[in-house]
Image (cartoon, rainbow, N blue to C red):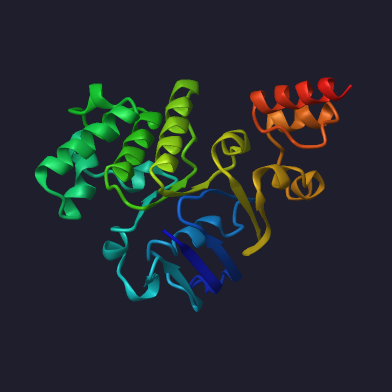
Amino acid sequence: MLIQVEQVHFAYPSGVNALNGVSLVIRSGERVGLVGENGSGKSTLARHLNGLLRPNVGRVWVGDWQTAEHSPAQMARRVAYVFQNPDEQLFRRRVWDEVAFGPQNLGHTPAQVRAQVEQALASLELSPVSDLNPRDLGYSGRRRVALASALAMHTPVLVFDEPTAGLDDGELAALSEVVASLHQQGKTVLTISHDLDFLAENVDRLVLMRHGEVVLDAPAPQFFGQRGLLEHVGLVPPQMVRLSQSLGQPKPGLTVEEVLGNLGQEQSIR
């Protein structure tokens, strides 16, 4: 589902200007990473997509809906949002009920709800704890419950705010599989994260924000090639990108396979 952000300005009641003329287009089915320093406007921008915030100036479209004309409850049919702090959105006493809340509110049939909940729980390795209280889980468990709650809604757009925080290697691998599956289904995924290693392997394009403005918007290989700009804003390139740059590879390798592939091409040329 196409997302269009058109010259959006937004200031909080405190007077803090959070967005200063942001324009952005995210095409249907894209996997986009949103990065920048704390306070750069990332979460503020993302919360305009589901109607939690509305522009002071400008417009935001999700498909043919202008978000300012729809309530957050209506926008939930198109955009599922996972907050940075999972405790902000967990309130049911059982994991299964928590994950079922979204699709039930959207009016899905009991059979659909059951199938969607079970699929979401399995994808994030939560089936064994489905009868527990989410508050009894550790931080990573609560985060995975929040992620599963979004997946179960089956929306065309998903927004993940710092989804990798607190996850171990196995949980990160499961999340990568989820993102890949969503991409195969044609869903649009926007991921806000400081984890550039995760983004390098799981998004196609990155958008860098600073002081409420978009300062760089490029496909992942070109984005990570802007080493000077990234260092200027305090972003450390992913490990594989740094390795490929230290090897003098003209094109940044985003994964182990790409770095090895670049080495193979260099050897064949020689």
Q: At which x and y percent is residue 266?
A: 83, 25
**184 in relation to 5, above or below:** above
**214 in relation to 221, above or below:** below
Q: At which x and y percent is residue 223?
A: 70, 47
Q: Residue furthest front?
A: 269
Q: Residue furthest left?
A: 110
At 27% across and 42% down in the image, what residue appears? 152
Look at the image and tell me in which quarter the N terminus lies.
bottom left
| Quadrant position of residue 174 | top left
Depth check: give the residue in front, 134 or 195. 195
Depth check: give the residue in front, 198 or 262. 262
At 48% across and 58% down in the image, what residue appears? 46
Depth check: give the residue in front, 138 or 252. 252
Q: At which x and y percent is residue 268?
A: 82, 21
Tell whether 10 sits left or right of 61: right
Look at the image and tell me in which quarter the C terminus lies.
top right
| Quadrant position of residue 243 | top right
Tell whether 61 sits left or right of 268: left
**247 in relation to 207, above or below:** above
Total tally of numbered discs in the picture: 0
Using the rendered image of the protein, determine whether residue 223 is visible from the camera's viewpoint.
yes
| Quadrant position of residue 247 | top right
Q: Residue furthest right?
A: 270
Using the rendered image of the protein, determine whether residue 94 is visible from the camera's viewpoint.
no
Q: At which x and y percent is residue 106?
A: 20, 55
**67 in relation to 184, above or below:** below
Depth check: give the residue in front, 165 or 13. 165
